[in-house]
Every structure is written in structure tokens, then in C-alpha cells.
Image (cartoon, rainbow, N blue to C red):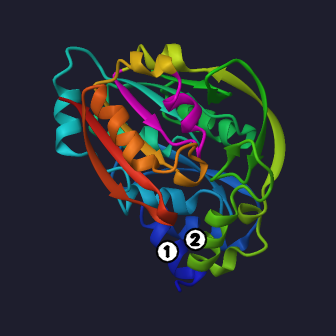
Amino acid sequence: MPGRLKVTRDAASNVRGRAGFVARELIGRPTTHVYRLRDAPYRAAIRHPLFDMWVLDEIFRNRAYAIPDAVSAKLRALDHPVRVLDLGGHVGLFGLWFRTTFPDATVTSYEPDPENAATLRRCVEANGLGDRWTVIEAAAAPSEGEATFISDGALSQLGGDNAALDDEHALLAQIFPFLRGKRLLTPKQVTVRTADVLPAMADCDFLKLDIQGGEWPLLTDKRFEKLSAVAFVLEMHPRAAPMPDPLSWVTKRFTRLGFRLIVLPAHGGERVIWGSRT
């Protein structure tokens, strides 16, 4: 099992000012610091300790969202800047990653967690992207209203109770034993606004959908058939699925809508699914 120092050094390798990153992480005093990314012309707002370093490393060093060639080709063929609908904006690391390939993209991020949303806004401001990146503090849903939200800062999700993320927290505890007893593995309940995002899905070029099980009410809504995106990436969470074979169902759903899929394994039995229009 990797120790905390190694994990921290690995994450710090993604930014300039590595020594400061490591020190802030290991000292353990809650703080948010803006770092210039090492291999991208952007700045990332990172909360210390423990909240964001592993997401930073997952995206920028481990390339969890490496864009497949088929997806990139579809997006480059557009005659206008890519319009990204980012459902599950977290603190903006995916948005920054996407803009390293498509720097003219406009991004609309939905993020219900109040702490995440505040950090996401700081990221947008630090990069001077307020005219091209909109942050909506709401949970992506098929209707307007309010809902219980389980917040741990990284794997937050709508509905359920504090046991809703047990499987993923157990996996994190195995990978990062030093996280046991920390805020990242101890979620709290908050009430958040829900926003009907189906109309926005009918007016985007690229859809990113990673909302910890909240994808199912959207995917099963009949209005999802109006999806305008020429490409998408979905992190599929089988445990929350309302059908016995979620991968088969998702494959059929998107194939009928005219997409060719690339299915990749992810942690905890999840799948990362990329799609591009045929």
C-alpha cells in the first residue's frame, strides 16, 4: 500500500511549487491554494489536506480522462468552439484537463456540493475564464427542487444516507490507509438545489456525466433521446442502477442514439464509457 508521503509527492508532481504542495498537504492545516499546473497553461485550486490531491493525480498524471481519438476527431470537426456540459464539476480539474486539448471550449459545470462549488469558482476566477466557464450550484437532475446530498468532498452523491458511499470509501481506505477517520471518508448530509438539466443536454456538443449514481434518472428519462452532443464520457456506477445489467442497458441506449462506444474499467467495478456519433 502506498504511504502518504509517496501519494503526496506523486500528486505534487502535477504542479509547479511541489515543495509547497507537499508541505501544505502533510502539515494538515485546512487551506486552499492555487497552483500553476506543470504541463498545462492553467491554475488549479486545491484544498489541503486530502480532498483534492488524488483527483488531481488521477486526471493529470494517470490520465483517467484521456480523450480517445474517435472522440477528439468528432469534436475537432465542429465549426464552432466545443460547448461542454460538465455534470459533476467538482473543483474544475476535468474542465481544465479538457481545455488543454480544446482551449476555446465553453464549459457549463453543475456542482451541488457547496464546498466543491466554492473551490470550482475560485478555479474559474484564477484562470480568468468567467466569460467561458459557467458554474451552476445545483445537482443535475430531471426536475427542479431540493434533495438530500451526501457530501464527502470528492465522491459526493444525491440521496441515500451516510452508508451510500461505503463501497467506494472502503476502496479508498484500502488504497490510502492514512485516510481512515478523515473527512474524505466521513460524509455529511446537506440539502441542495436540483436543476433540470435535460434541456441543457439538448444544447451541448460534449457531455461529461460523473455524478456518483445520479446518472440513472437522467439516462432513463425519455427526453435524454434529444441529446445533441456529438461525443460524451460517462462514469457509470452499477450499484445505483435500476436494471439488472446496467452495462448492457447503457450500451443499447447509446447505440440506438447513434453512438459508437469505448468501455474502460474503473475503480470499484465502475466503467468509464466514451462515445462518439457514428
The image's mark for residue 212 is none
* Quarter assignment of residue 115: top right
Q: Which residue is mark 2?
A: 22
Please report the residue visible at 21 percent of the width from the left and 36 percent of the height from the top: 72
Image x and y of residue 40, in percent: 35, 47
Does dot 1 land on a helix, a strand or a loop? helix
Mark 1: amino acid: Arg
Callout 2 environment at 10 Å: few (<14), some (14 to 19), or many (20+)? many
Q: Which residue is mark 1?
A: 9
Q: Residue 27's x, y, as percent?
A: 71, 72
Q: Are marks 2 and 1 in contact (CB under 8 Å)?
A: yes
Tell whether position 81 is magenta. Answer: no
Quadrant of residue 196 in the image?
A: top right
- Residue at point 55%, 37% (across, down): 216
Callout 1 environment at 10 Å: few (<14), some (14 to 19), or many (20+)? some
- Identify the residue at horizontal 49%, vertical 19% (top origin): 222
Residue 42 visible in the picture:
no
Count the labels in the image: 2
Q: Which residues make up the magenta segment?
A: 205-221
Q: Quick one: which residue is furthest to the front in this view?
A: 244
